[in-house]
């Protein structure tokens, strides 16, 4: 796109070209809206088949259907996607896991594990095949928003005037800061360690998760997520102190620790690359809508990764926004205040349910009370009741 000083005029401006921003651009464009997508970085494709991305996501079946409707999912290499057909969850003192099977509710799967960069590349291809206008490599420097429109100014003096602006620029959202929207923030005092392994035995398309206690009594959650063939991706949410200890181990020592938590049930592991780590924080914007701006994805909320719902929540932001916009009266503008307030109410309920679940589980398993420990492990065992299991599975795949 040329660096013209003439203002660009559009229906929707999207700031941020992560997964949620890219998907929003494709979806809004397909719905007939004129879209401009802005990101301070230029997208880079990385399709090295010998390299496995350490950032992976569990995409819910409903969101797979939606991504398919956008024309993105079918662009992925099926050989790089793993299907979760079951999940096993262990407490810190339960001999038998809670087993959740897709077949319990006559479903094919609980979700699909996909690499972030693969899905990002697929969405970029859909952007390139559309008439979405893109502005890459330009920092945003100023934002004015009223109930009538938003005016975004870039560092090259380009201005973009739009009826609606979507902030999809991540947990440290520049747009959110410009709006003066506060954030409720709560550190978990945990670090998530991610790594990929080749396993000796087949994972049988089962995701496995252990709630653990470290030597200091702090909660830890280790998830083994299936990748294609005999490969898994792990997410180990551990107290920051214990995570630092784990990250100082050499490759063999770290691998032994991961195997030990899971009782070596998949045999010997081989670490594929150096583990990566990031701090865990619960974040929630005080409002998802202000004037003609809507916050989506991590700009609006960031939750604990134990439920694997971060990007699914972001996609549902976009899906619900589109439903609200599609249902609007023909005389209502895209930034109609009543319309956007309705959207905000819809999303608040979904977000409350998910944050209550993840935050509640975190505190339940982080408790050092002997009574709480006994009750939580009894609860996991009791959940193996067939009726309860069906309800849990139905809830999981409905996301």
Image: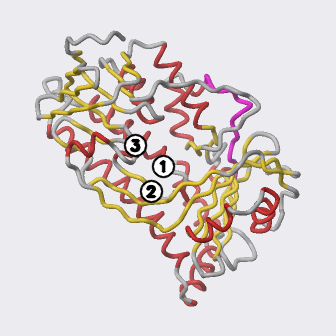
Can residue 98 be seen here? The reply is no
Which mark is in front, 2 or 3?
3
Q: Classify mark 3: helix, strand or loop.
A: loop
Q: Which one is earlier in the sequence, the residue at label 2 or at label 3? A: 3
- Residue designated by label 3: 170
Instruction: Measure the C-alpha gap from mark 1 to mark 2.
Output: 6 Å
Q: Is residue 363 above or below residue 235?
A: below
- What crowding class fits label 3: few (fewer than 14 Cα within 10 Å), some (14-19), or many (20 or more)? many
Look at the image and give the residue range highlighted in magenta. Answer: 74-86
Q: Classify mark 1: helix, strand or loop.
A: helix
Which percent across, then down, holds residue 90? Answer: 68, 69
Q: Which one is earlier in the sequence, the residue at label 1 or at label 2? A: 2
Pick whichever, 128 or 100, lies toward us.
128
Instruction: Measure the C-alpha gap from mark 2 to mark 3.
Output: 13 Å
Find out whether the residues at labels 1 and 2 contact each other: C-beta distance under 8 Å: yes
- Residue designated by label 1: 310
- Residue designated by label 2: 303
């Amino acid at each position: 796109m040329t660096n013209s000083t003439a203002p660009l005029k559009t229906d929707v401006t999207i700031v941020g070209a992560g997964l949620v921003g890219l998907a929003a651009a494709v979806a809004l464009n397909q719905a007939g809206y004129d879209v401009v997508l802005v990101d301070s970085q230029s997208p880079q494709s990385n399709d090295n088949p010998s390299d496995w991305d350490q950032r992976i996501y569990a995409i819910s079946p409903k969101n797979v259907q939606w991504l398919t409707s956008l024309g993105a999912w079918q662009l992925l290499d099926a050989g790089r996607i793993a299907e979760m057909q079951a999940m096993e969850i262990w407490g810190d003192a339960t001999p038998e896991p809670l087993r959740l099977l897709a077949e319990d509710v006559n479903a094919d799967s609980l979700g699909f594990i996909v690499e972030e960069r693969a899905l990002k590349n697929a969405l970029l291809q859909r952007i390139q095949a559309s008439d979405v206008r893109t502005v890459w490599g330009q920092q945003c420097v100023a934002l004015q928003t009223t109930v009538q429109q938003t005016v975004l100014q870039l560092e090259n003096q380009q201005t973009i005037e739009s009826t609606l602006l979507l902030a999809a620029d991540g947990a440290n959202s520049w747009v959110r800061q410009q709006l003066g929207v506060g954030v409720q923030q709560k550190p978990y005092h945990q670090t998530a360690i991610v790594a990929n392994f080749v396993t000796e035995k087949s994972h049988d398309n089962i995701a496995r998760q252990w709630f653990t206690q470290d030597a200091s009594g702090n909660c830890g959650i280790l998830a083994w997520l299936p990748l294609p063939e005999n490969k898994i991706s792990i997410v180990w949410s551990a107290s920051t102190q214990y995570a630092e200890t784990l990250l100082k181990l050499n490759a063999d020592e770290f691998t032994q620790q991961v195997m030990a938590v899971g009782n070596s049930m998949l045999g010997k592991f081989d670490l594929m690359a150096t583990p990566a780590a990031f701090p865990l924080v619960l974040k929630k914007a005080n409002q998802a809508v202000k004037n003609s701006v809507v916050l989506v994805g991590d700009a609006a909320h960031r939750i604990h990764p134990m439920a694997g719902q971060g990007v699914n929540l972001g996609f549902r932001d976009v899906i619900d926004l589109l439903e609200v916009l599609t249902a609007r009266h023909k005389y209502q503008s895209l930034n109609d205040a009543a319309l956007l307030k309705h959207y905000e109410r819809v999303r608040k309920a979904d977000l409350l349910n998910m944050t209550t679940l993840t935050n509640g589980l975190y505190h339940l398993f982080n408790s050092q009370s002997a009574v709480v420990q006994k009750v939580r492990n009894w609860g996991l065992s009791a959940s193996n009741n067939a009726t309860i299991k069906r309800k849990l599975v139905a809830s999981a795949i409905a996301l």
